[in-house]
Image: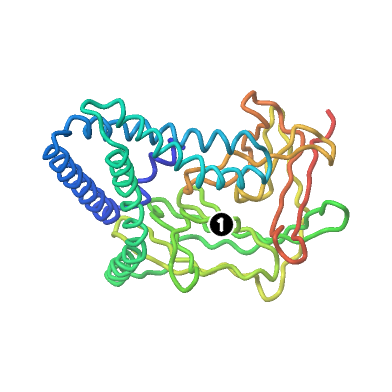
């Protein structure tokens, strides 16, 4: 979670930081003005100190209310936990929020009446919900502005041929779980020295979307190199590479596609190393590979740790794959492709041979 928060400013970019920073500052000022107005109203009644005490109690009351709802939901396992969460959100949460505000008003000096405590509870709730509503309402205008700015930036960027060495498509034959085989096509774009890839975008829904914020099991990056893996007949999205070399920034569109005539298939045979390393015949996206510390086909498989750095999310040859943080050796690995497809996709399993 902390790693995601650390990457959040980079995800927003300069314009996003300025826009949402300005929105946050405006909301904080607005909430501060509302609190000042509220305090003046209660001071006119001679209860300014009591109102201030209740308002200061709103934050710990909020923490207790949230903790109670989450505790109730986590006390039940399975799908029922979601139902319990919603029931607690609309029953337990209001009771605690208004009840604790009433208790704080009774403990305050000067003491507040029930109506005054309820007023502070309602106004505090509005101060919490209105910013959420305003941020949600600004999402679409923000995305439109981002697209306009991105379009202007792209129009001003030099469009040049791709500097990468586009390697031929290679076809592998995978031994499918349950019998039979399935084909996998792979292709690599190797960047020359001095070239850096700043961003890779995919055409999605008629708009260019940054792949760093998407799931893209068909592609992975190793710095400036790109590697693709897909099943024959699968249509991959069109990509737009933002790259830079000594002459400046540039962009290039590229779409990996299967050849008209498929090349001969070679068996996909991982080479196991001592100590847990595996040499794969080709780099694969990390999202395609799961590992197990059991050699049997019924062993429990788990996904590799998700790479938060989308510029280095490939499983390369010789990677040290481990089952747990205790560095247990991987005994088998599974490659799963398009499991959501109507034909249930392709799943292949490879077991470390006995010493």
Locate residue 350: give its quadrant: top right
The x, y position of residue 160, in whole percent, is 37, 69
313 displayed left or right of 293: left
Q: How many labels does the image show?
A: 1
Residue 169 lies, with reference to residue 122, above or below; the image says below
Left or right, residue 101 beside residue 184: left
Q: Nearer the viewer, residue 232 or 59?
A: 59
Q: In this view, does 260 lie to the left or right of 72?
A: right
At 79% from the left edge and 36% from the top edge, which residue is drawn? 352
Residue closer to the observer: 33 or 177: 33
- Dot 1 falls on a residue whose secondary structure is loop
Q: Where is residue 108 in the image (x, y as percent from the top left)?
A: 26, 27
**Spot occupied by residue 191 in the image (x, y as percentages of width and height):** 46, 55
Q: Which residue is drawn at 65% across and 35% down?
A: 321
**Callout 1 crowding tier (Cα within 10 Å): few <14, some 14–19, many ≥20:** some
168 vs 23, nearest the viewer:
23
Residue furthest out toward the top: 326
Which residue does the image show at 51% across and 60% down from the upper left? 165
Q: Is residue 310 or residue 46 the one in the foreground?
A: 46
What residue sits right under mark 1 in the picture?
216
Q: Which residue is located at x 13 percent, y 37 percent?
A: 43
Task: Identify the coloring.
Answer: rainbow
| Relative height, residue 148 to residue 70 (above, below) | below
Image vertical order of residue 106 relative to residue 122, above or below = above
Quarter residue 54 falls in: top left
Which quadrant holds the C terminus? Answer: top right
In this view, which residue lies farthest toward the bottom?
260
Tell me which corner region of the image, top left, top right, bottom left or bottom right, holds residue 16.
Answer: bottom left
């Amino acid at each position: 979670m902390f790693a995601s928060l650390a990457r959040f400013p980079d995800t927003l970019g300069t314009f996003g930081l300025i826009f949402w920073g300005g929105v946050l500052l405006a909301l904080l000022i607005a909430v501060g003005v509302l609190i000042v107005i509220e305090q003046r109203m209660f001071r006119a009644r001679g209860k300014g100190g009591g109102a201030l005490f209740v308002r200061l109690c709103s934050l710990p009351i909020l923490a207790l209310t949230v903790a109670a709802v989450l505790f109730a939901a986590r006390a039940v396992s399975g799908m029922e936990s979601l139902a319990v969460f919603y029931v607690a959100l609309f029953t337990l949460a209001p009771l605690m929020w208004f009840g604790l505000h009433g208790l704080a008003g009774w403990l305050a000096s000067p003491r507040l009446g029930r109506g005054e405590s309820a007023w502070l509870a309602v106004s505090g709730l509005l101060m919490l919900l209105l910013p959420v509503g305003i941020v949600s309402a600004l999402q679409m205008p923000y995305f439109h502005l981002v697209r306009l700015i991105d379009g202007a930036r792209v129009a001003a960027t030099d469009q040049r041929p791709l500097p990468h060495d586009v390697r031929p498509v290679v076809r592998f034959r995978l031994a499918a779980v349950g019998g039979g085989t399935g084909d996998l096509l792979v292709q690599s774009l190797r960047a020359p020295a001095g070239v850096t890839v700043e961003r890779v975008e995919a055409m999605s829904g008629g708009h260019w979307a940054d792949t760093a914020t998407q799931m893209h099991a068909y592609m992975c990056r190793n710095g400036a190199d790109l590697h693709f893996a897909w099943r024959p007949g699968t249509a991959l999205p069109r990509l737009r590479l933002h790259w830079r070399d000594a002459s400046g920034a540039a962009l290039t569109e590229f779409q990996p596609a299967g050849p008209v005539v498929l090349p001969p298939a070679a068996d996909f045979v991982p080479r196991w190393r001592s100590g847990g390393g595996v040499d794969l015949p080709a780099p694969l996206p990390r999202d395609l590979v799961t590992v197990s510390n059991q050699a049997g086909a019924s062993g429990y498989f788990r996904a590799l740790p998700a790479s938060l750095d989308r510029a280095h999310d490939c499983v390369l040859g010789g990677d040290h794959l481990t089952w747990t943080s205790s560095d247990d050796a991987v005994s088998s690995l599974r490659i799963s492709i398009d499991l959501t497809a109507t034909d249930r996709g392709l799943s292949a399993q490879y077991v470390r041979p006995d010493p």
